[in-house]
Image (cartoon, rainbow, N blue to C red):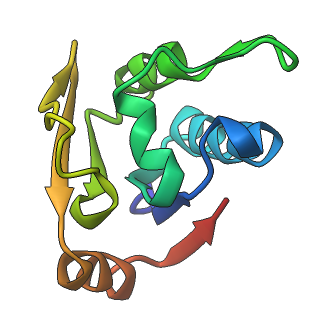
């Protein structure tokens, strides 16, 4: 059996770009469903998805709940670019079975350089 492929998926849109956010989450779920190794990074306005009940009524999707489902796809940790979280916002470290790590730009660059595939939504 071949070694799993390493994917880095960056989500950069919050609810204001729900169509793009939906595509990114679909990509993550598809990679996970096919046994690929996936790292997820929330950047820019997507960093707020761990702090709110993100439900897009027009698309009928609850993005917050979809984040909660990632462990079902062998994704047990997501990364948030620390500088994109408002200073007065508490840092959430865990969403049920999903760990949240806050990373620096330097950490992000290391992740990008060690991933075989990098996609951004």
Residue at (62, 66) in percent of width and height: 120
Q: Quadrant of the N terminus?
A: bottom left
Horizontal side of 21 relative to 50 (left or right) equals right
Question: In this picture, is 50 found above or below 116?
Answer: above
Quadrant housing residue 106: bottom left
Using the rendered image of the protein, determine whether residue 26 is visible from the camera's viewpoint. no
Quadrant housing residue 33: top right
Horizontal side of 98 relative to 4 (left or right) equals left
Residue at (49, 41) in percent of width and height: 35
Residue at (72, 41) in percent of width and height: 16
Using the rendered image of the protein, determine whether residue 65 is visible from the camera's viewpoint. yes
Residue 7 in picture, x, y percent from top left: 48, 63
Residue 9 in picture, x, y percent from top left: 52, 59
Q: Nearer the viewer, residue 95 or 34?
A: 95
Question: In this picture, is 24 found above or below 52?
Answer: below
Horizontal side of 30 relative to 57 (left or right) equals left
Q: Quadrant of the C terminus?
A: bottom right
Counting labels gives 0
Residue 38 in picture, x, y percent from top left: 43, 52
Quadrant housing residue 67: top left
Horizontal side of 18 relative to 45 (left or right) equals right
Question: In this picture, is 70 found above or below 81?
Answer: above
């Amino acid at each position: 059996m071949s070694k799993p492929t390493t994917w880095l998926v960056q989500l950069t849109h919050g609810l204001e770009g729900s169509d793009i956010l939906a595509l990114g989450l679909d990509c993550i779920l598809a990679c996970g469903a096919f046994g690929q190794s996936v790292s997820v990074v929330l950047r820019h306005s997507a960093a707020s998805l761990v702090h709110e009940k993100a439900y897009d009524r027009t698309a009928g999707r609850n993005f917050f709940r979809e984040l909660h489902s990632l462990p079902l796809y062998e994704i047990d940790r997501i990364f948030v670019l620390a500088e994109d979280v408002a200073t007065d916002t508490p840092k959430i470290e865990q969403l049920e079975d999903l760990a949240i790590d806050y990373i620096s730009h330097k950490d992000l660059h290391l992740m990008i350089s060690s991933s075989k595939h990098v996609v951004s939504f």
